[in-house]
Image (cartoon, grey):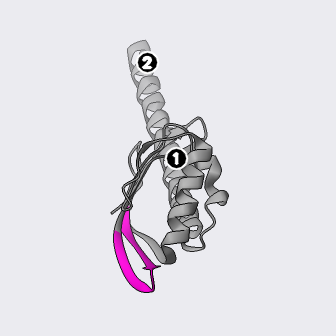
Amino acid sequence: MKKVLNKYFFVSLLLFLISYLNIYGEDNRESAQRTFAQIETAFTENKIETIVELIDNTTFISLSNGVVGYFSTDQTVNILKKFLEENKPVQFILSNKKTETRKPFATGSFVYINSGIRKQSKVFVSMYLSGENWIIAQITIN
């Protein structure tokens, strides 16, 4: 009888842990979706300062103007601001988002005006969770 109770206890505990992990995962997926939406808005509205908390010195950037590398948070923000001044945003859309992973990523397009000409570039953004906050791991605009 004791073995049967232990078996049920462990099965119940296992089911509880699985359901907890699923709930936890859903929360992370939802917060990743919100964070991607925040990034889209920041780029579309040319307001990079609104996502400064998502950027740190581990954020890798690769831009179509040749800027590539890791920079301090302030440098990254300034580089992105300058990039958006030269390439006036029309639309920044992350259309393909994968949030059911520990390191969510998204691809999409950046439509902008450069020297009076409308252009489009491909975009890649990835993130990682640091504590309870998402940090942008990489931004590529080519």
Q: Residue furthest top?
A: 2
Query: What is the CA distance from the residue labelled 2 to the residue labelled 1?
Result: 26 Å
Left or right position of 74 against 137 = right
Between 79 and 4, the one lying in front of the other is 79
Residue 3 higher or lower than 72, as above or below: above
Query: Residue 28: x percent and y percent?
Result: 52, 48
Magenta residues (range): 107-121
Q: Residue furthest front?
A: 115
Q: Which residue lies under the disc numbered 2?
A: 6
Secondary structure under tag 2 reads: helix
Query: Residue 92: x percent and y percent?
Result: 47, 72
Q: Secondary structure of the magenta portion, mostly?
A: strand
Q: Which residue lies under the disc numbered 1?
A: 23
Residue type beneath disc 1? Ile
Note whether residue 40 is visible: no
Q: Residue at x 48, y 43 (%)?
A: 59
Q: Where the N terminus falls, by quadrant? A: top left
Nearer the camera: disc 2 or disc 1: 1
Q: Where the C terminus falls, by quadrant? A: bottom left
Q: Is residue 92 magenta?
A: no
The answer to which quarter of the image holds residue 99 is bottom left
Q: Residue at x 40, y 85 (%)?
A: 117
Residue type beneath disc 2? Asn
Between 127 and 140, the one lying in front of the other is 140
- The tag earlier along the polypeptide, 2 or 1, is 2
Residue 121 higher or lower than 6, as above or below: below
Between 78 and 53, the one lying in front of the other is 78
